[in-house]
């Protein structure tokens, strides 16, 4: 039996477009589009002339931060980026145990689903529970019904033992995904940032990426401290350090790149590396604006752990670019949504980000009926000033209903949130005990 969505305004990101019509979904993929007639046994859903979007992709997130909402602030307020890491996030990640890792991922996935985000490119850290942590995250995302591209952020912050555990977890997970590819989950090689990894570690990360023909997902120049510490410790520019260890290559994901100089930015742009732009996080940390308009290479959109509302992130990317007089157009922002889907598609071996025939049926139905003309030329304007996650009513992943009439089909959302409250309290208590 097929599902036919009728009377829809079909929006695509790659390339950006809109077309009134219907979709036929069968076998987990888009089987037909346009003038589709339902057959006798087909399930039919009338979209009422509202916008239907492809499931969105969060290009860089940290699901482990989902239980940080409302967390007590540190005793002493951080005054710079490094202190934000030391007093907030590096205490949180140390306090994570199996239960809180899985629950964070479950809540993060539920929040994503409600925003029409169906694939999460995650970057995970839990130094006191490394081995098996990616399986816990996968289980939570899978239970909610979404897709994931996962990695463990390898670092030398916890000595050689911690480094090896991080590398091993990446290798184990990549191997598992490679042995049983299902289009739902894949791995990348994760690393925290240049300033917390030794030369030997960078070499091992590159080897691992080469073994699995993939890239390294790493924070780059989020704050000036990354470049400064590289020059102090290694007597070279950050970009040269990354090049010398073979991280600047297609497949790698560099999150932020906020403080690379124009020459370094040009090298990243020409290398095939995908930059993940996270404007709300950059504002939240007060680290500045990534000069995305100068990059001649792929730039995708991520949230860096501030939920997974990609339409809100797109709006923030637009407003921040206007504030910075960056010279972007709405189409540039729409293309960042498309780029997140392209990167995840390559990792997962499926087609995301569009509603074309053959794409997997990750489909977001909204109640947004445009009150102004919507054309292929102005779709991006509607994404930035019209449709938002508040309009998401139904979501399909791989052709299966995951959110239906505003209700999550895959789990008891209210019960999960209540249980998460207890897990979060215990997590915050453990954090308070960490120096
Ligand atoms: Zn990040």
Image: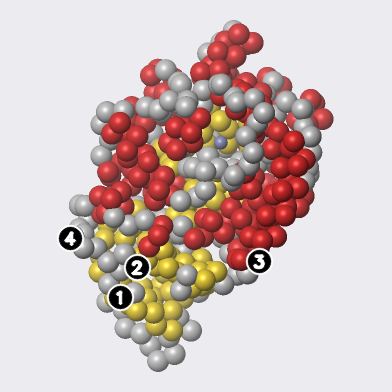
Numbered circle sitting on residue 373: 4
Q: Which of marks 3 and 2 is nearer the N terminus?
A: 2
* Residue 92 placement (x, y as % from top left): 69, 38
Q: How far apart are marks 1 and 3 (CA)?
A: 32 Å
Q: Which mark is residue 367?
A: 2
Which of the four quarters of the rendered structure image does ligand 1 lie in? top right
Q: How far apart are marks 3 and 4 (CA)?
A: 42 Å
What kind of element bears circle 3?
helix
Disc with the residue nearer the chain's start (4 vs 1): 1
Q: Residue 415 carries which label?
A: 3
Residue occupying image coordinates x 61% and y 55%: 107
- Please identify, in this view, whether the residue under mark 3 or under mark 2 is nearer the observer: 3
Q: Marks 3 and 4: CB-CB under 8 Å?
A: no
Q: Are marks 4 and 1 in contact (CB under 8 Å)?
A: no
The residue at the point 48 percent across, 42 percent down is 302
The answer to whether residue 208 is seen in the rendering is: no
Q: Position of residue 360 (x, y in %)?
A: 47, 64
Q: Is residue 383 above or below residue 432?
A: below
Few, some or many C-alpha atoms within 10 Å of disc 2 (few <14, some 14-19, many ≥20)?
A: some
Secondary structure state at the residue bearing disc 4: loop
In this orientation, which residue lies closer to the viewer: 145 or 12?
145
């Amino acid at each position: 039996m097929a599902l036919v969505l009728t009377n829809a305004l079909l929006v695509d990101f790659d390339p950006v477009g809109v077309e009134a019509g219907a979709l036929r979904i069968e076998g987990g993929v888009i089987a037909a589009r346009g003038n589709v007639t339902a057959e006798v046994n087909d399930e039919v859903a009338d979209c009422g002339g509202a916008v239907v979007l492809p499931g969105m992709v969060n290009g860089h997130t940290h699901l482990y931060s989902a239980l940080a909402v409302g967390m007590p602030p540190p005793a002493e307020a951080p005054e710079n980026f490094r202190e934000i890491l030391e007093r907030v996030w590096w205490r949180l990640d140390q306090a994570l145990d199996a239960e809180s890792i899985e629950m964070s991922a479950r809540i993060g996935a539920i929040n994503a689903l409600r925003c029409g985000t169906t694939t999460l490119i995650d970057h995970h850290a839990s130094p006191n529970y490394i081995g098996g942590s990616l399986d816990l995250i996968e289980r939570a995302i899978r239970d909610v019904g979404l897709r994931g591209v996962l990695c463990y952020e390898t670092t030398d912050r916890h000595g050689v033992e911690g480094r090896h555990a991080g590398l091993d977890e990446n290798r184990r997970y990549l191997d598992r995904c490679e042995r049983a590819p299902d289009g739902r989950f894949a791995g990348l090689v994760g690393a925290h940032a240049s300033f917390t990894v030794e030369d030997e570690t960078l070499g091992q990360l590159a080897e691992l990426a080469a073994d699995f023909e993939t890239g390294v997902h790493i924070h780059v120049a989020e704050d000036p401290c990354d470049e400064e510490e590289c020059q102090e410790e290694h007597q070279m520019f950050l970009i040269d350090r990354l090049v010398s260890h073979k991280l600047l290559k297609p497949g790698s994901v560099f999150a932020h790149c906020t403080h690379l100089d124009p020459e370094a930015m040009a090298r990243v742009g020409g290398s095939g590396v995908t930059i993940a732009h996270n404007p709300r996080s950059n504002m939240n940390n007060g680290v500045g604006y990534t000069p995305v308009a100068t990059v001649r290479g792929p730039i995708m959109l991520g949230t860096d752990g501030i939920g997974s509302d990609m339409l809100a992130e797109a709006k923030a990317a637009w407003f921040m670019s206007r504030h910075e007089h960056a010279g972007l157009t709405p189409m540039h922002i729409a293309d960042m949504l498309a780029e997140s889907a392209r990167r995840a598609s390559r990792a997962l071996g499926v087609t995301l980000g569009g509603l074309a025939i053959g794409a997997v049926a990750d489909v977001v139905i909204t109640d947004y009926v445009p009150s102004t003309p919507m054309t292929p030329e102005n779709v991006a304007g509607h994404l930035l000033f019209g449709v938002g996650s508040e309009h998401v009513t139904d979501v399909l992943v791989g052709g299966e209903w995951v959110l239906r009439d505003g209700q999550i089909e895959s789990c008891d959302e209210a019960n999960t949130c209540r249980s998460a409250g207890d897990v979060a309290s215990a997590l915050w208590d453990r954090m308070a005990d960490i120096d």
